[in-house]
Image (spheres, coloured by chain):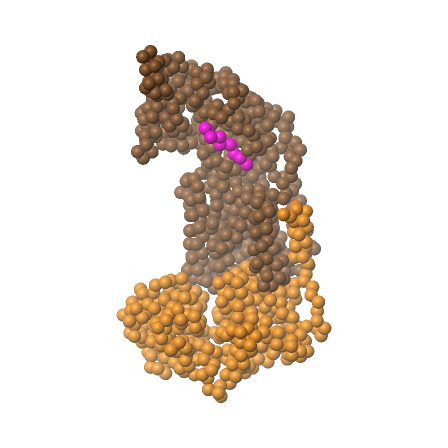
Amino acid sequence: MSRALPSRVSLVGLAGFLVVVALVPGVAPNAYVVQVLAFTGLNVMLAVGLNLLMGYAGQVSLGHAGFYGLGAYVSSVLGVRFGLSPWLGMPAAACVTALLAYAIGAPTLKLKSYYLAMATLGIGIVLHLGFVQLYWWTGGSSGLANIPPLDIGPLHFGSDRAHYYAIWLFAAAALWLALNLVNSSVGRALRAVGDSEVAASAMGVDAPWAKRRIFVLSAVYASVAGSLYAHYITVISPEIFSFLASVVLVLMVAIGGIGQYWGPVLGALLLTLLPEYLRKYGDYEVPLYGLALIVVMLFLPRGLAGLLQRGARRAPSVRVDAVPPPGVAATVGAAPLLEVSGVSKHFGGVRAVQACSFDIRAGEIRAVIGPNGAGKTTLFNVITGVYPPTQGEVRFQGQRLTGLPPHEVARLGVYRTFQNVQLFGSLSVVENVMVAGAGRHPDRFVDALLARRAQAEADRDRLARALGCLALVGIEPLAFAPAASLPFGQQKLVEVARALAGEPALLLLDEPAAGLNSTEKVEMMRLIGRLRALGLAVLLIEHDMRLVMGVSDRVVVLNYGKKIADGSPAEVQADRAVVRSYLGEEADSVARGH
Amino acid sequence: MITRRQFQTTMVGGLAATLLPRREARAAGEPYRIGSLFSYTGPAAFLGDRMKRSVELFVEETNKKGGIQGHPIELVLYDAASESSKAVLAVKRLIEQDKVDVIVGDGNRSDIGLALIPSVQRAQVPLMSVSGATSLVEPVKDRAWVFKSTVNDVEVVARLLDFFKKKGVKDVAMLNDTGAFGVSARDVLRAQAPAAGVNVVAWEEFQPSDNDLTTQLTRIRSTSAQAIVCWTVTPAGVVFLKNAQQLGLKQMLVHGFGFVADRYMQLAGDAAEGLMLTSLKFPVAEQLPDGDPIKATILDYKARYRAKYKEETDVYGGQAWDGICMVAHAMAQSGNAKDKIRTGLETTIKEFKGVGGIFTFSPEKHWGLAKSDVVMIEWRKGKFQLVDL
C-alpha cells in the first residue's frame, strides 16, 4: 500500500510548462513580445529563488535586488574593464554572491525570527550604494554601458529570440532544481523549519544550516538572473537594483502564492505582463495596476497558485510497505542512560530549575511531576539543548549533551514531543513523521537538487519507516491527511510517531495526555506500554496521576524548580513533602489525622 | 466575488491582448507615428510631467492645423516610470509593436537614455534625447541614431570659464556631486581650465543624498578660491548654499545648469541671494533684449502652454518642446522614413530657433546648442536676473 506524497510537485506539469515556453516565440507577433517574455523568464528565476527562502524556509529577504545587481555588476565589470567573457563572468558573479550570502547568513540565520530580513535590507542598500559610489568600475549613477553580449565563440546572440531561449534555458534549470529540492527530504525539512523551527530542530534538522544553504541558493539564482539581464540589455544602472525592486520581488512571491511551487511563476508572469498590458490605458495604467493587485490580494488570499489547487489527491505512484520501528537493543550494565547532574536554569531573577539531579536507566519509564510552574518543561528544554543550563550538566550514554544544539542532541538518540503540539502544518501526517530520522538518511543537498537515485531510495525507506511508526501509534490510515486537519488527540499521536521515527533510545513526552478524553488517555497508556516493549526509555511529564502511577517505574517530583522527591510511585505518593506541595500544609495535617 | 472561471477568462483575455499587436483605427492621409517616452511617475517625474504635456500640446496644435504637410501625427506615449528596465521594454514596444517612425524623449534621465541606445541603434530608429549626459550622443559613430535637444556640459563649462576671465576670477573651487551630472562636469572642467587660465585650487565631492557639506566647505575656505562652483541637480545644492551662509563664506557662489529651479531657490531662502547660475536663456526670457533671436520663440511657447494648461512651464518642458519641433521640422522636409528623418535632422536643422537656443546639427554633431546659448544669471529679490549675455 502507498501513495504519492501530497506535497510533491509533478515533473510532468513542469515539462508541459516548458514546452509551452519553447513554443511561444513561434506565435509571438513581434520582438517586443519576445522581450517581455524574456524579462518574465528573469523574474521567474528571481521569484522562484526567493520563494524557496520565503515560502519554504520561512525567511524573508528584502535585499534580493541587491544580489540581482551584484550578479549584473560583477560580470559586467569583469567584461567591460577586464575583457572577461560573460560565460566566465557569470559563474564568477555567482561565486561572489554566494560568498556574500553565506557570510550574511552565518550570524543572522542562527537566530530565529526575522533577523535575515533586517540584514538583507541593509545589504541591499549597501550594495546599491556600492554600485553608485565605485564609479571608476561601475560608471556610478549613470550606469555601465557596452557590456559584452552573451556570444559563445562564433555564435552571436543578436536577436531577442536567441536571448529568450538563453534566459529560459537558465530559468528551466532553476525551475527543475527547485522542483527536485521541494520534492526531496531537504525541501521537507525546510518546510518543517518554516513551520516550527523548534520542533524541526528537536527532530534532528540542522535548522540554521538548512536555512543558510537555501539562502545562498536563492541569492545565486538572483545573481545569475542579474548577469543574464546585463549581457542581454548591455547597459545597466543602479536604480534597477534598488530597494523598491526588492519589494516588487517579494510582491511577486506573495501575489503568486507563498510556499507553493507554481506561486512565484504565476506572480512573476502577472507582475511582468500586467504593467505591459496596461500600458495602452495610458494615464490609467498605474491605478489599474494597483487595483488589479488589490483584487488578487482580496479574493485570492492564497495567491494565484491557490487557483491551481485540486481538491482530489493524485493517484498512487510508489508502492511501499510499512516497516515497523526497530526496538532498542537491551544494554547490559548498570550505567544510566541519561544523567542529569546539578542542573540549574535561571531566567534573570527567576530560578526555573535549581540544582536538580536524577538519572534514567535504559528501558525505564520515568515521570517528572510537579505543580504548574515547577520547572518541568524547562528541564526538558535543558536536556534537549533548547536552553543551555546555568549550572550543571547532562550526559547521555556517557556523552555530554550540555552545549550541543538541539538537532545534535536528537541525532544522538533523544527525541521529544511538545506540550503545545508543534506539528508542521504545511505537511501531511506521514511527511511530518518523515522529517525525523536524519540520522539514518542524512540530507544531501546536491543529491536532492539533482534528484539522484540514492536520494529517492533513501526517501522511500523513510516513507516505509514513517508508515511503520504511524501503524504503531494506530493512525496509519490517516497518513496522507494534512497534519493540521487532525483532531487534537490524533495530533498528539502524530507527535509520538514523529519522535519514534528518529529511532531514539530515550523519548521525552511532554504532557502526552493533556487535553485528551478518557478513552484517548487509556489509548495513550497502552501506547506507552508498547514503547516500553520496544526497549525505549521514556521520560514523561504528566499531570494525570492515574497515567503517571500506572506506567512509571520511578517518579521525580519538582516544586519551585527543586527536586523534592524521587522514587517508585508508591514511595512518592506517601511522601509528605509531595502531598504538601500538591495539596497545601492544611491537607497534610488532615492526612496525618489532626 | 469573482469565480475562478471568470478570473481565468479575464487573465487569458489579458494575456492574449498583450501578445497581440496594437491595432488602431488609422486616420485618413497616412499619419506620421511619433513615439514618446517620459518618466511621469517615479523620482524623475518632476521633469517628465511638463515634457509630456509639451509634446501633447505640440501634437494637438499641429493636428488642428492639418498635421505635418497634411499628415496627422499619431502620438504613442509611454511612461518610463524612472526605471530603465521598464523603459527598455517600452521603447521596444514603440519600435516593434507600435512601429513608430521616430521617438522623442528618452525617459528624461541620462541613465535611462543610455539604456535605450542599444535598442534604437539596432532597430535604426531615430531617438531625440532630452537628457543631459554628453555620452548620449558621443561618440557619434556609435550613436548614429541619437540626437539631443539639450546643451552639453562642454559648452556650459566653457561659458562659465569665459565669465570668470571677464570678472578676473583666477582661483576657483569645484564641488560636484558623485552622480553622472557632477562627475562629468568635473572632468570637463579639469580638461578646460588650464587653457582658460583658471586655476582650480580645490576639487571636492559630495553624495547626492548628503545633508551636510561643512567639511568640504571648510577645506575650501582655507584655499585662495575666489569662486565656488557647485554642480548638482539634487537638493544637496540647497545644503551647499545654507552651509556657505552659516560659515560666512564671502566667495562668489556658482551653480551649474541643473539647478535653475525656482523651487530650489525658495528652499534656500536668503542663502540663495546673489547666487550666480549658468543657464539657458529660457528662465530670463522676458529680460532679453528685443533683438534677441529666440526671445519671441520662448515667450510664444510659454504663452501657448499657459493657455492650454493654466500653469507655467519650465526649461525642461522646453527641451521636449524643442525636441518634437525639430523632429517635426525634419519630417516636414524629408518625410517619415526612419533614415530620412535621421539625415533630415543632420542636414535641415541649421540655425533652428528653439526655446533652448539656436540648434545646428550635423553628421558629426548630434547636439545642437553652442556656448553662445548659455548665459549667466543671478538669483536676486526672488527672481532670476540676467547678468551676462
In this orientation, does residue B167 appear? Answer: yes
Q: Main secondary structure of the magenta part?
A: loop
Give the magenta-colored segment's residue range.
A418-426
Q: Residue at x 65, y 41 (%)?
A: A12
Front one among A429 and A4: A429
Q: Which chain is brown?
A: A
Residue A84 position, x and y percent, is: 50, 56
Residue A452 position, x and y percent, is: 57, 36
Residue A27 position, x and y percent, is: 70, 55
Left or right position of A396 against A3:
left
Residue A311 position, x and y percent, is: 65, 37
Toward the front, the furthest residue is A594
Quadrant that contains the C terminus of chain A: top left
Front one among A243 and A183: A243
Left or right position of A79 against B250:
right
Q: Is residue A291 magenta?
A: no
In this orientation, does residue A145 appear? Answer: no
In which image quadrant can residue B58 be found? bottom right
Quadrant that contains the N terminus of chain A: top right
Toward the right, the furthest residue is B28
Compared with residue A157, is residue A521 higher up or lower down, i.e. above or below? above
Toward the top, the furthest residue is A593
Front one among A154 and A66: A66
Compared with residue A102, is residue B226 higher up or lower down, i.e. above or below? below
In which image quadrant can residue A586 be found? top left
Question: Which color was chain B given?
Answer: orange
